[in-house]
């Protein structure tokens, strides 16, 4: 006589891993990143002393695009419009206060980096804590380096000769714009 | 590993260039300061970008599940170089789901790091399922570079159509064979007492009923019914699928039939009986009655393949004619076809014990609701009730599938009928 038929080894009822509350928290992470974009955009609008309406409209449009669809270049529009708004607010030869300049630089950086992160993590995905921790750590490192360089540039003061300043500036532009392009080009090969 | 730039890289480089040019032209140190964080945030990450791709492995704790069960599904990642965002998208095919999320996950890892992401994988519906290869999106250089690749192997999962344990009364219409767990009508070696009779040569001493022997002065033994097995043939009517099989909360007649067949097969095989399966949609490939655990797996394999398919009347007639005369035939049908009902009646006329399990779901959503469709469906239901009545006239009971114990009364009735038929002969 054959033995009684047994059922195969199967899974079992498991406790939720992770729990539904954790899942909700993951989703909130994505929304939080977009909130940072919005706050940075508001800061860009609020910091300049006398904002120009055209630049304000362009900045708002850029920020809204960045929040709604971070991968679509809204951040580029918002950054460009904010820079225009800054120059329009203080004139071609203005001398903005250092505090406002630092705040505005921080807001520009936050808008750029949070949009880059939001483009990488669409709403609805599980955004785990290590992503935010690592991103925050890198932001702090970059800001610390930028702060040191900024302090150094203020310590040196303005170069006396305008031609030297222009030369250095253009060189800086070339280096800063060329390095990423060269790196990318080399990496593709 | 091949990286491509993100829009963030373009906007950062553009902004830095504009700020520095303006800083030079306007001799404004504040514009240089505005561009510094952006410049640092562009150059530093690009210099420290990842160069080696991560690897991913996928595994589940169990390859076979019952309906409604869950198991753990884990993704093991090895990340050689640090990555800011690792997005893992898992393709699920079939009736499996990740109820707590996990189909689209973003995480990060430092250099030379092993990561294990664990999720709960649920199987709400029977069938064969598959976890496809994982699509991995990588973000490096603080959001400035991106890359995509796929990894991991596909994992197959089987969900057995068993939910609750089915049990039926220990009555079968025609116990046959020499061994088994059912009480037969014959006197022999067994457990169930059949009476007390005088001792004859050859009786075992342990069968002597001492109280009766002392009272009567002659040796008496306790007679028992012999234990026999039976042959059960499950006939699945898969000619048509009525109802929706869109998920765990909606069932079609095929869902009911497959679940009922699995439960009944498991029950009878557990009791040492021989069980066969005949899918009318594939009448040429019946599962012949066998017993044992391996046979249960075989039956489950066949049940997992049940689909609505056109029924060839000739092939069905041939397959049904091969069923043993002493077999208990359990036909699982929505009774929407006269031909199938006629075959059931024919089997009964031929002396087989036939029982029809009605698999039509309680609620049937019509595919194209409309006055004519609803009227046609009502006519179909009237014809169906006529079929049920006609089958009852032929001595074929029709019972709805209600899970455990739903066949007890009918099986007892069939057993009585089979015994009565033997007396008349």
Image (cartoon, coloured by chain):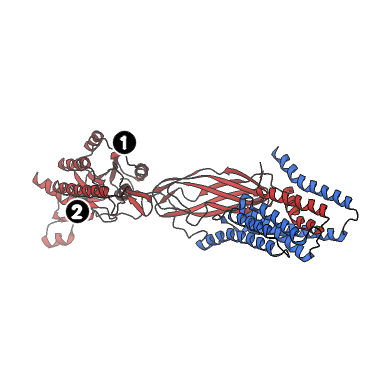
Q: Residue at x 73, y 61 (%)?
A: A104
Residue B57 placement, left or right of B27: left
Circle on res. B285: 1
Within 10 Å of the Cα at label 2, are there few (<14), some (14-19), or many (20+) other Cα atoms?
some
Q: Residue at x 69, y 39 (%)?
A: A188
Instruction: In the displayed orientation, state which residue is furthest to the right.
Output: A160
Horizontal and vertical percent for residue B79?
Answer: 64, 48
Judging depth in this view, the residue of B362 and B73 nearest the camera is: B362
Q: Chain of mark 2?
A: B
Within 10 Å of the Cα at label 1, are there few (<14), some (14-19), or many (20+) other Cα atoms?
some
Q: Which residue is mark 2?
A: B412
Horizontal and vertical percent for residue A134?
Answer: 67, 57
Horizontal and vertical percent for residue B344?
Answer: 20, 43
Residues tagged 2 and 1 counted as in contact (Cβ below 8 A): no
Instruction: In the displayed orientation, state which residue is furthest to the front.
Output: A53
Label 2's element? helix
Identify the chain drawn in blue: A
Judging depth in this view, the residue of A165 and B128 nearest the camera is: A165
Label 1's element? loop
Q: Is residue A189 above or below residue B399?
A: above
Q: Chain of mark 1?
A: B
Horizontal and vertical percent for residue B297?
Answer: 37, 44
Chain B shade? red
Query: In this view of the protein, can residue B180 be seen by the observer?
Result: no
**Quarter of the image containing the C terminus of chain A?**
top right
Q: Residue at x 82, y 55 (%)?
A: B26
User: Which tag, 2 or 1, sits closer to the chain's start?
Assistant: 1
Query: In this view of the protein, can residue B100 be seen by the observer?
Result: yes
Discs 2, 1: same chain: yes
């Amino acid at each position: 006589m054959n033995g009684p038929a047994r059922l195969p080894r199967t899974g079992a009822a498991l406790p939720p891993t992770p729990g539904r509350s954790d899942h909700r928290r993951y989703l909130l992470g994505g929304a939080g990143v977009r909130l940072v974009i919005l706050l940075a955009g508001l800061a860009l609008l609020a910091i300049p002393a006398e904002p120009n309406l055209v630049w304000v409209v362009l900045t708002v449009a850029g920020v809204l695009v960045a929040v709604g669809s971070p991968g679509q270049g809204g951040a580029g529009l918002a950054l460009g419009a904010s820079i225009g708004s800054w120059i329009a607010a203080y004139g071609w030869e203005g001398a903005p206060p250092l505090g406002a300049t630092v705040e505005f630089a921080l807001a520009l950086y936050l808008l750029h980096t949070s949009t880059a992160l939001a483009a990488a993590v669409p709403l609805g995905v599980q955004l785990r804590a290590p992503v935010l921790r690592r991103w925050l750590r890198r932001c702090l490192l970059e800001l610390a380096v930028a702060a040191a360089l900024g302090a150094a540039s203020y310590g040196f003061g303005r170069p006396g000769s305008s031609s030297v300043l222009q030369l250095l500036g253009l060189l800086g532009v070339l280096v800063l714009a060329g390095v990423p392009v060269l790196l990318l080009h080399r990496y593709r090969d | 590993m091949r990286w491509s730039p993100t829009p963030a890289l373009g906007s950062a480089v553009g902004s830095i260039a504009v700020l520095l040019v303006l800083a030079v032209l306007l001799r404004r140190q504040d514009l240089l300061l505005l561009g510094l964080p952006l410049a640092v945030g562009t150059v530093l990450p690009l210099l420290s970008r990842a160069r080696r791709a991560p690897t991913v492995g996928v595994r589940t704790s169990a390859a076979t599940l019952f309906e409604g069960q869950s198991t753990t599904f884990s993704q093991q990642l090895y990340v050689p170089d640090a990555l800011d965002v690792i997005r893992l998208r898992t393709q699920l095919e079939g009736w499996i789901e990740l109820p707590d999320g996990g189909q689209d996950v973003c995480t990060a890892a430092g250099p030379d790091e092993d990561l294990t992401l664990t999720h709960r994988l649920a199987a709400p519906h029977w069938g064969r399922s598959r976890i496809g290869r994982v699509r991995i999106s990588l973000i490096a250089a603080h959001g400035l570079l991106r890359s995509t690749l796929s990894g991991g192997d596909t994992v197959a999962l089987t969900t057995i159509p068993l939910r609750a344990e089915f049990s039926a009364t220990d009555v079968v219409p025609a116990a046959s064979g020499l061994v088994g767990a059912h009480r037969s009508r014959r006197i022999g070696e067994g457990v169930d007492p059949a009476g007390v009779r005088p001792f004859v040569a050859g009786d075992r001493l342990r069968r002597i009923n001492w109280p009766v022997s002392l009272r009567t002065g002659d040796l008496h033994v306790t007679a028992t019914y012999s234990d026999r097995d039976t042959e059960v043939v499950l006939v699945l009517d898969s000619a048509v699928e009525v109802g929706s099989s869109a998920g765990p909360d909606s069932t079609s007649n095929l869902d009911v039939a497959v679940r009922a067949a699995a439960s009944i097969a498991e029950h009878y095989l557990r009791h040492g009986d021989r069980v066969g399966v005949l899918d009318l949609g594939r009448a040429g490939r019946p599962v012949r009655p066998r017993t044992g655990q391996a046979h249960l797996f075989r039956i489950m394999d066949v049940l997992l393949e049940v689909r609505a398919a056109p029924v060839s009347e000739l092939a069905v007639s041939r397959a049904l004619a091969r069923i043993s005369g002493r077999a208990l035939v359990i036909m699982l049908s929505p009774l929407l076809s006269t031909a199938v009902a006629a075959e059931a009646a024919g089997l009964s006329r031929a002396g087989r014990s036939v029982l029809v399990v009605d698999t039509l779901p309680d609620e049937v959503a019509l595919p194209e609701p409309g006055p004519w469709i609803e009227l046609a469906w009502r006519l179909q239901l009237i014809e169906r009730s006529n079929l049920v009545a006609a089958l009852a006239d032929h001595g074929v009971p029709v019972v709805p599938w209600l899970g455990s114990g739903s066949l007890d009364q009918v099986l007892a009735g069939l057993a009585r009928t089979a015994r009565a038929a033997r007396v008349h002969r």
